[in-house]
Structures are given as structure tokens and as C-alpha cells.
């Protein structure tokens, strides 16, 4: 009678996950998310602890956070100070995004808030092409320069160009690479202005159907130190798709040389916003 072979193979398979170190590589590529909002509408559905769990699941290690109102940013910061990079936004309600730069009462708020809390930047703020010289914008950018803080702006190519020309000493982060602006616009601005970084939230044209677009690829290879990825949780439903957005970003980052992919995934964010000492 033949005895059955001992199931050592099966046993080994069962213990393999314990014996092997966790896979490190593209799958685990950590992300520095340059565009997170934790605004009032999300507070009840997703308490701060739940947000951090969502970030864990999505592999987002640190994130630039700005919120309407600002209190959201600090609620999240209290939960995980080492993971939340707080930006000053200046909006009290969602509708403030279009008129904030005409509200002179914000001049005082700006100074007070920047002096009161350890903000690491100003933004995300929305601007139109002709707004670069508005007094509130001028004060906000000059205070940011004085304090060495980058400014995250949502505007088109013309608006970004005007800001870069008027404030050559400021460091700007261009939200969504201008959203509707083509890759060529990012190239023009990056070539002319060393004080510009470009953030790619909501830019699905970077990798249509998941496959990295050749023009964007060329741009990433030409300016590997100047791009960051982001999610933009501007409405509550964006939190539900956080993991999916992170997966999309990792998908095209993996199609770049490893060093370039890592820079855009997290190294550029860490360089621009080094962890607080
Ligand atoms: Zn946004």
C-alpha cells in the first residue's frame, strides 16, 4: 500500500506570506497627494479617523490639505499631524471661491491666521486671468513669500503666467495643470519659470485608458522634479473613489523610469514640503 505524500508543499505555501518580506516595488509605491480637501460636507460621513484609514488603503503617505472652512484641515491635522500638510485657504463657504480676492476683510484674516497656526502653504485658491494684481491676492502672495510658503492656485495658463511674472520670488503649485489647459501649456510655463511646480489631480488625459500619453511622458522626462500627483476630494463622493484614483496614478507612474515615477509619486512633494522638524 502506498502512503500519501505528506502535504509539505501545501504547508509551505500557507506560511509563505510570513516567510517572505512584504513586496516592495511599484505595487507599494507610496504617494504624496498634492490635492486633498476635507470640507464641511465630508465631516459627518467621514470622521478624521476614517479619512486616515482611506488614505492608508490608497497608499497616500502625506497630503496637502486645504478645506472650506479651514477648520476641516485642522481636524484632520489633529488626527495625524505627520501626514497632513496644512494650507491656508481663506474660504468660509464653498461660494467664496469666486469672490475671495475682492473681499478686503480677508487681508486681516490672512495675517492673523498665518501668524497663529503652522501653515505650510497658501491655497488652493481660485483665480481668473485678470486677478493677479487684486490687493488680497497681492498681500497673500507677498506674505507667503516672506514666510517661504508655496501658493497653490487653480487658474488657466494666462492667469498662471500673470502670477509668475508679477511674483518671481514666489513658489507656485499649479492646480490640475490648469485643468482645461493642454500639456503644451505646462511645458511653456515650466520652461520660462523655475518657481513653478505642476500638480496633476483630475488630469485623466495624462493616461487615457490607463496608458501614459506620449506628450505628457516627454514632459515628465524633461521636468522630473516639477510634477506632483493629486486626488482632489472637492466633493464627498471623491473620498469613495480615493483608492481608485490612487490606482490610476500608480498605473501611469509605473510606465515611467522608476526614478522619475518615484519623484512624481512622492519625492517632489517631500522636497517641496519637508516634514516638520
Ligand atoms: Zn481643489
Image: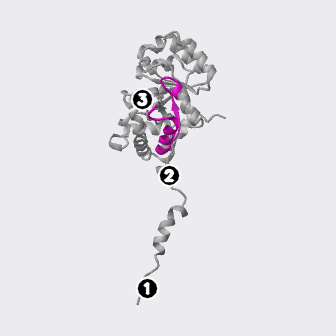
Mark closer to the observer (3, 1): 1
The answer to whether residue 25 is above or below residue 77 is below
Task: Label 2, secondary structure: give it.
Answer: loop
The answer to whether residue 193 is above or below residue 17 is above
The answer to whether residue 25 is above or below residue 41 is below
Query: Foreground: 137 or 241?
Result: 241
Rendered-image quarter of ligand 1: top left
Q: What stretch is highlighted in magenta?
A: 44-72
Label 3 near ligand 1 (CB < 8 Å): yes
Q: Is residue 183 left or right of residue 69?
A: left
Instruction: Determine crowd level at label 1: few under 14, some 14-19, many 20+ residues with C-alpha closer than 10 A.
Output: few
According to the image, label 3 marks what residue?
234
According to the image, label 2 marks what residue?
25
The quarter of the rendered structure image containing the C terminus is: top right
The Cα–Cα distance between marks 3 and 2, rounded to whole angstroms, is 30 Å
**How far from the left and from the top, in percent, is residue 22?**
53, 56
**How are the residues colored?**
one colour
Q: Is residue 98 magenta?
A: no
Task: Label 3, secondary structure: give it.
Answer: loop
According to the image, label 1 marks what residue?
3
The Cα–Cα distance between marks 3 and 1, rounded to whole angstroms, is 64 Å
Q: Is residue 234 left or right of residue 274?
A: left
Mark 3 or mark 1: which comes first in sequence?
1
Mark closer to the observer (2, 1): 1
Q: Residue at x 32, y 42 (%)?
A: 209
**How far from the left and from the top, in percent, is residue 162?**
46, 17
Amino acid at each position: 500500500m502506498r502512503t500519501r505524500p505528506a502535504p509539505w508543499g501545501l504547508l509551505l505555501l500557507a506560511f509563505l506570506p510570513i516567510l517572505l518580506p512584504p513586496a516592495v516595488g511599484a505595487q507599494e509605491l507610496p504617494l504624496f497627494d498634492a490635492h486633498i480637501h476635507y470640507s464641511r460636507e465630508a465631516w459627518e460621513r467621514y470622521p478624521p479617523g476614517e479619512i486616515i484609514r482611506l488614505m492608508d488603503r490608497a497608499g497616500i503617505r502625506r497630503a496637502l490639505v486645504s478645506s472650506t472652512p479651514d477648520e476641516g484641515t485642522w481636524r484632520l491635522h489633529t488626527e495625524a499631524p505627520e501626514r497632513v500638510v496644512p494650507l491656508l485657504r481663506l474660504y468660509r463657504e464653498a461660494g467664496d471661491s469666486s469672490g475671495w480676492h475682492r473681499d478686503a476683510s480677508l487681508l486681516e484674516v490672512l495675517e492673523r491666521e498665518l501668524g497663529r497656526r503652522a501653515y505650510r502653504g497658501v491655497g488652493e485658491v481660485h483665480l481668473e486671468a485678470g486677478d493677479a494684481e487684486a490687493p488680497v491676492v497681492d498681500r497673500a502672495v507677498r506674505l507667503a513669500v516672506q514666510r517661504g510658503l508655496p501658493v497653490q492656485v487653480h487658474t488657466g495658463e494666462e492667469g498662471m503666467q500673470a502670477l509668475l511674472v508679477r511674483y518671481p520670488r514666489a513658489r507656485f503649485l499649479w492646480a490640475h495643470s490648469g485643468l482645461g489647459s493642454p500639456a503644451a501649456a505646462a511645458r511653456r510655463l515650466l520652461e520660462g519659470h523655475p518657481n513653478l511646480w505642476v500638480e496633476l489631480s483630475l488630469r485623466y488625459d495624462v493616461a487615457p485608458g490607463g496608458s501614459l500619453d506620449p506628450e505628457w511622458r516627454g514632459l515628465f522626462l524633461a521636468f522630473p522634479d516639477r510634477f506632483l500627483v493629486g486626488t482632489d476630494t472637492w466633493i464627498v463622493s471623491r473620498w469613495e473613489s480615493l483608492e481608485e484614483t490612487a490606482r490610476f496614478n500608480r498605473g501611469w507612474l509605473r510606465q515611467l523610469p522608476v526614478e522619475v515615477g518615484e519623484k512624481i509619486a512622492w519625492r517632489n512633494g517631500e522636497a517641496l514640503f519637508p516634514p516638520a522638524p
